[in-house]
Image (cartoon, rainbow, N blue to C red):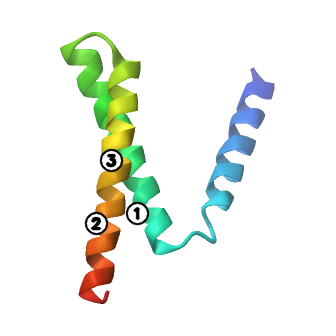
Amino acid sequence: MKTNRVMLACCLVGGLTGCADMSSGEQRTLSGAAVGTAAGALIGGLATGRPLRGAAIGAAVGGAGGWLYNRHEKSEGK
């Protein structure tokens, strides 16, 4: 049990440090994909009973939304 917690902590720290030097566009795309994954899994699980399919669709839609939002922000000069 203790080994599992140490492994989980190492994965979390490694995942967070991997995002440290990302551009704002990469951060927005990743954030959109993460939120889309969570929302898609929840909606897919509740509506169809297939949370993995919902998560995959949500990740794609969220990532595309984050990328489009970044393009919009760049065109506005922000």
Residue under numbered circle 1: 28
Q: Residue 18, position in %: x, y? A: 67, 58
Give the label on residue 62, or none.
3
Q: Secondary structure at mark 1?
A: helix
Q: Amino acid at mark 1?
A: Arg
Q: Looking at the image, tell me whether mark 1 or mark 2 is earlier in sequence order.
A: 1
How many neighbours does mark 1 have within 10 angstroms: few (below 14), some (14-19), or many (20 or more)?
Answer: many
- Relative height, residue 61 to residue 47 (above, below): below
Crowding around mark 2 (Cα neighbors within 10 Å: few <14, some 14 to 19, many 20+) is some
Residue 51 location, x and y as percent? 35, 19
Answer left or right for 2 relative to 46. Answer: right
User: Looking at the rendering, which quadrant does residue 65 occupy?
Assistant: bottom left
Q: CA distance from mark 1 to mark 2?
A: 8 Å
Up the image or down, 57 lies above or below 36; here it is above
At x 33%, y 13%, the residue is 50
In the rendered image, the residue lying farthest to the bottom is: 77
Which one is in front, 35 or 26?
A: 26
- Disc 2: which residue: 69
The C terminus sits in image quarter: bottom left
- Residue 13 lies, in percent from the top left, at 69, 51
Where on the picture, by quarter, is residue 25? Answer: bottom left
Q: Are discs 1 and 2 less than 8 Å apart at CB? A: yes
Q: Are marks 3 and 1 in contact (CB under 8 Å)?
A: no
Residue displayed at 38% across by 50% down: 63
Q: Is residue 5 above or below residue 61?
A: above
Q: Residue furthest right?
A: 3
